[in-house]
Amino acid sequence: MAEKKEKMNVTVGKGPKAADEHAFSPLVDIYEDAEGTTVLAAELPGAKAEGVDIRVDKGVLTITADAPLPEVDPKYSQIYTSFVGGQYFRAFALSDEIDRDKIEAGLDNGVLTIRLPRAKTAQTRKIQIKTG
């Protein structure tokens, strides 16, 4: 069984949306690398980098992204569709162990990767014992 990390509490909330749009909660994997950096990977199919908004405010990391409907070539007559457009939204409460000034993000093939490095003050260090 996986060990639960207390570094980041995950809170999902509803995002801003218009009456005719759907808000999607993207699937997310969270893991830690060898240096202690927390890595968050979120599925955002159809999202482009310019349509993704990532913010940290008052200890909460929010991800909002547009999910436009795929364009259909006008030479085709649509018979059936199950694709829907809308917006992705997900929020995460961050602990004080995260260095908010060094957060990095990248989007590749519909997967958003956010690197949340551990603050220097939160890193494990060995304390030397002084002797007389």
Image (cartoon, rainbow, N blue to C red):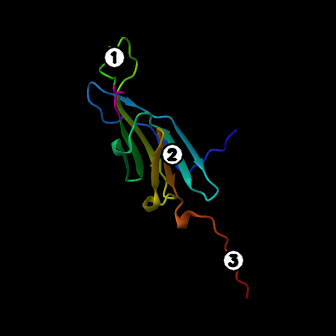
Q: Residues within 10 Å of mark 2 (few under 14, many from 20)?
A: few
Q: Which element carries disc 1, helix, strand or loop?
A: loop
Q: In this picture, is 111 found above or below 124? A: above
Pick the front one: 39 or 61: 39
Q: Secondary structure at mark 3?
A: loop
Identify the residue under disc 3: 128
Q: Which residues are magenta?
A: 67-71
Which quadrant, please, contains the C terminus?
A: bottom right
How many numbered discs sit on the rendered protein?
3
Q: Is residue 122 above or below residue 109?
A: below
Question: Nearer the N terminus, badge 2 or badge 1?
Answer: 2
In the rendered image, the residue lying farthest to the left is 19
Q: Earlier in the sequence, mark 2 or mark 3?
A: 2
Residue 59 is situated, as x and y percent measured from the top left of the image, at 41, 53
Answer above or below: position of 125 versus 43.
below
Q: Secondary structure at mark 2?
A: strand
What separation in Å lies between label 2 and label 1 (alpha carbons)? 46 Å
Residue type at mark 3?
A: Gln
Is 90 in the magenta?
no
Which of the 4 quarters of the picture holds residue 63?
top left
